[in-house]
Amino acid sequence: MGALPVKRGSSVPSRLRRHALVVFMLGSALCFGGQVAAATKLIPVAAQAVKPLSLASVQDLDLGTILLGPGKWSNAAVGVSRAGSFSCASVNVTCSGVSRAATYTLTGSNSAVVRITAPNVVLTNQSDPSQTLTLIIDNPGTVTIPNSGQKGIDFSLGGSIVVDSNTAGGTYAGTFNVTVDY
């Protein structure tokens, strides 16, 4: 700011001095930190890239052949665990043939935990579609993929059915609805 010319012997009116003082104070405030303080917050950001999941069937579940005993009886359970252990302990049924759990190969991102969903399966008698059995699924719930390569990891699903003396003879079949997700 330029200085105001003042004649010798005259004084600057007090009103003008106050005005100059206010202008000087405002200018000083703007130049020397009179700015409003800004608020800053550092917020972490993360992203995780994962490989797409791939699921391939390796082996179908098979409960073998179940021979129903004579008389009136109920609640004979027949099943195979995820580990492949077969159970056919009722005195009312005789089981034969090869039993096995269903096996799948799962590939995706290394060290990822994957959820497995597989609801129970309705098995339909192939000779009489009105006759059904419910396969209760033995599901691991989750698996951890040990690598990101093509090898992936195998996991199994087991299941069990309950038969009784009124179960219609025939081949019962159904399909799994297996879903995997991160």
Image (cartoon, helix red, strand yellow):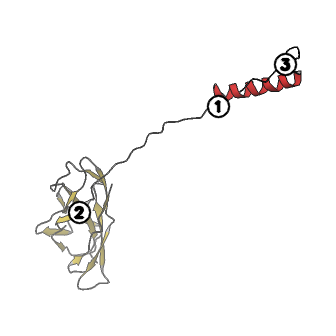
Q: Residue furthest front?
A: 8
Element under disc 1? loop
Q: Residue at x 24, y 61 (%)?
A: 54
Query: Looking at the image, which residue sits at the far bottom?
Result: 127
Does residue 90 show up? no
Cα distance in 3D space between marks 3 and 1: 38 Å
- Tell me which residue sits at (11%, 67%) in the image: 98
**Label 3: which residue?**
7
49 or 107, which lies in front?
Answer: 49
- Look at mark 2 in the image and give the residue it sits on: 55
Q: Tell which circle, 2 or 1, labels the residue nearer the N-terminal end.
A: 1
Amino acid type at image mark 1: Gln
Assign the N terminus to one quadrant of the image. top right
Around disc 2, counting alpha carbons within 10 Å, would you say few (fewer than 14), some (14 to 19), or many (20 or more)? some
Mark 1 = which residue? 35
The answer to whether residue 2 is left or right of residue 12 is: left
Q: Nearer the viewer, mark 3 or mark 1?
A: 3
Q: Of marks 3 and 2, which one's residue comes earlier in the chain?
A: 3
Q: Which amino acid does label 3 sit on?
A: Lys
| Coordinates of residue 81 in the picture (x, y in percent) | 21, 58
Between disc 2 and disc 1, the foreground one is 1
Which of pointers 3 and 2 indicates the residue nearer the eye?
Answer: 3
- Height in image: 165 above or below 180? below
Earlier along the polypeptide chain: callout 3 or callout 1? 3
Residue most toward the left? 97
What's the residue type where badge 2 is placed?
A: Leu
Q: In this view, does 5 lie to the left or right of 132?
A: right
**Image quadrant where one finds the C terminus:** bottom left
